Amino acid sequence: MDKSWINKLRSSTEYLDGVQNFIKFAFEKSNMNGKILCPCQKCVNGSALDPKIVEEHLVWNGFLKGYTEWVLHGEFIPSCNQPSDLEDTFNFGCSDTEQNSVEEDDIRGLLRDALGHNIRTVGEDERAVIDQSMHVEESIHADDTAHYDNLVKDCDQELYPGCKNFTKISFLLHLLHLKYLNGWSSKSFTMLLQLLKDAFPEGVTLPSSSYEAKKLIKELDLGYEKIHSCPNDCILYRGENRNQESCRICGTPRWGKHKDDENDSLTEVDAAPTKKKPAKILRYFPLIPRLKRMFASPKTASSMRWHDEGRTKDGMLRHPADSSVWKAVDDRHPEFASDARSVRLGLATDGSYMDY
């Protein structure tokens, strides 16, 4: 598929035709309830939008530079040669020898980038931190040691005795990738896993349910914190509000109603106590673990330092680092500014009112 149009002028016929063809391809291969991920330079595949809006974004903002293997939009990339940065798909079109190699999936590379370890030899206890020039603190890896050992073990475990194409982890990641692209429900995914376990030879290492599958790869997850919230977004039930039973502003109850609450068929003696269910939950993603993960991978670590080490510094305003506000912060906090790894945080809201 010709993708040279990505680098053409956005006003050119080649670019506009290319956008149209991309929208058709992406909608056919990866639509999620009528929406597709937007690969414009602002959304960077972070938002699922209506195809018409995606088309407008691509014309106005431009196509994401370097995104030439559309794995997030249903494209399967052969892995015959050196795996590329975005390659995470099946090995179609390769020779038998190459196709039989589980190394093609580069699962160890995934673990290395996710947990910051470098795997030298399978089963070897020695671990090395890649790219010492990054000066990543050892504390980044300390909490991940147990997780790392479990994942390395699963990384090299055969899918079933004698299987050469997939390991336990690589096959499961492929299945979860397909689940995401095609919008499979957890129930349908569990049914598929059970069918595959019956179809594969004895000794297959697949999990039995969607829950077990997600639990297995949870070691790669950064996790989040659940915080009860007022249904009207007035307060969060944390800190001084932790033990409140209703919102102190609007009076709305903290807890939602269960279906069983409306069922009066059980007597008070027979009815088992039900666990309270919060009316609304906010999922908080802690920042520090994510920053550690970014700096543990040499690729993202380099991008995090690009504002100081990679950008063009000719006085032109191209990046927030060229702005007077950025420079004022650097002048006021020279120690902070001297380290290229220092991260500046910006406050943004989406559909909420900030009360100062």
Image (spheres, rainbow, N blue to C red):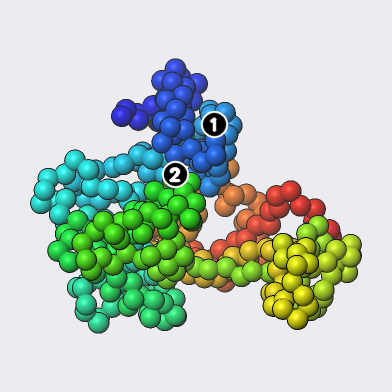
x, y (%) of residue 250? 89, 62
The residue under the point 56% across, 44% down is: 47
Q: Amino acid at mark 1?
A: Pro
x, y (%) of residue 147? 39, 76
Mark drawn on residue 316? none
Q: Is residue 179 visible?
A: yes
- At label 1, counting other C-alpha atoms closer than 10 Å, the crowd grade (few under 14, some 14-19, many 20 or more) is many
Using the image, determine if residue 199 lies above or below residue 125: above
The quadrant in which residue 159 appears is bottom left
Q: Nearer the viewer, residue 35 or 307?
A: 35
- Would residue 156 be found to the left or right of residue 285 on screen? left
Mark drawn on residue 51? 1
Using the image, determine if residue 133 lies above or below residue 105: below
* Residue at the spot of label 2: 182
Q: Nearer the viewer, mark 2 or mark 1?
A: 2
Secondary structure, mark 2, is: helix
The residue under the point 84% across, 70% down is: 246
Q: Is residue 138 visible?
A: no
